[in-house]
Image (tube, rainbow, N blue to C red):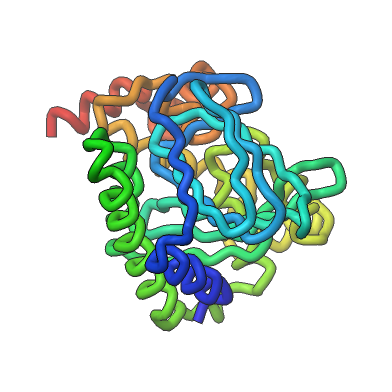
Amino acid sequence: MSPHAKDLERVLASLRSERLKIRIAKPSGLFRRKPRSYFHAYPELFVQTGGGTDFECPSESFRLRTWEVGVVPTGVPHAETPVNLKTPYSILVFMQARDGFILHRAASTERGEIVAKDTDQLVSPRGRAAFRYLDEMSAPVTEKNRTGFQRSLLEVFLITMLGELHRPSRSTDSQSPLMVEAEKMARALLGNPDLSVASLAATLGCSADYLSRRFHQEHGLTLTGWITRERLIMAKDLLADPRHSIAEIGWMCGFASASYFIRVFRQQTNLTPRAWRESVTVR
């Protein structure tokens, strides 16, 4: 069973007793770049398990305190600043993945940087589909029904996640524990343009050279090449959705600029992102 399940059960109990405080970021400034902020192709759920997090969004700022829950809908730019309060900073983050979902616990460094620690990555179509409930929580409903509507959606989401976390894990005997953790952390951070071999190695407690060498030995390609491949797989999925511009998709997939995204995409596929989108649409 996942070590995170106990925390989720505590949150679910608090929700059912109507003691849980839920903060939902307003869906404004969607898919726009802001300094220090990132936006994602899917909604995120945050469970503050220690300290607090100061969120800065286009139309509001708020602090998520210990054992409160925050929801950031799809496309909302947000910056996160860790805060040590009565307890040290610690937070659980749920993110949708291509074939399931990722759950990681983050801590903060002495320099105030947020780093991912324990990570669960589950192949789960059911879990992946449940993220739609998070986006629906920000849908306009009457004031009278809003609280019950949001709590009901969150309960369904949490129950789904707990059910999936209680399932037996897939065997990863073919990979070393270090490589398993490297993949998990990299997948959780694909949308961050600052993701690098050096930053992963620092979090995993090894040198960048050692991590690169071991990754190449076990995978047959470089870690940098693997990250690029995963980002392009994500981009291909997003290009099928006409709501997103080419630039937005590049940013959501962790490319620092639209021009760099287009160049890398063309190098790997012999097509521009726009041509790829048109080919998918024709089919």
In this view, the residue farthest toward the top is 259
In this view, the residue farthest toward the right is 110
Above/below status of 248 relative to 174? above
Give the residue drawn at x 51%, y 28%.
77
Above/below status of 225 relative to 201? above
Give the residue drawn at x 39%, y 36%.
74
Question: In the image shown, does 160 or 51 lie closer to the viewer?
Answer: 51
Above/below status of 234 relative to 249? below
Percent from the top left, x then y, of residue 205?
A: 81, 61
Give the residue drawn at x 65%, y 44%.
53
Q: In which quarter of the image is residue 207?
A: bottom right
Percent from the top left, x then y, of residue 23?
A: 48, 43
Percent from the top left, x then y, of residue 85?
A: 76, 51
Give the residue drawn at x 55%, y 51%.
188
Q: In which quarter of the image is residue 220?
A: bottom right
Q: Can residue 237 be seen in this snapshot?
A: yes
Q: In which quarter of the image is residue 83?
A: top right
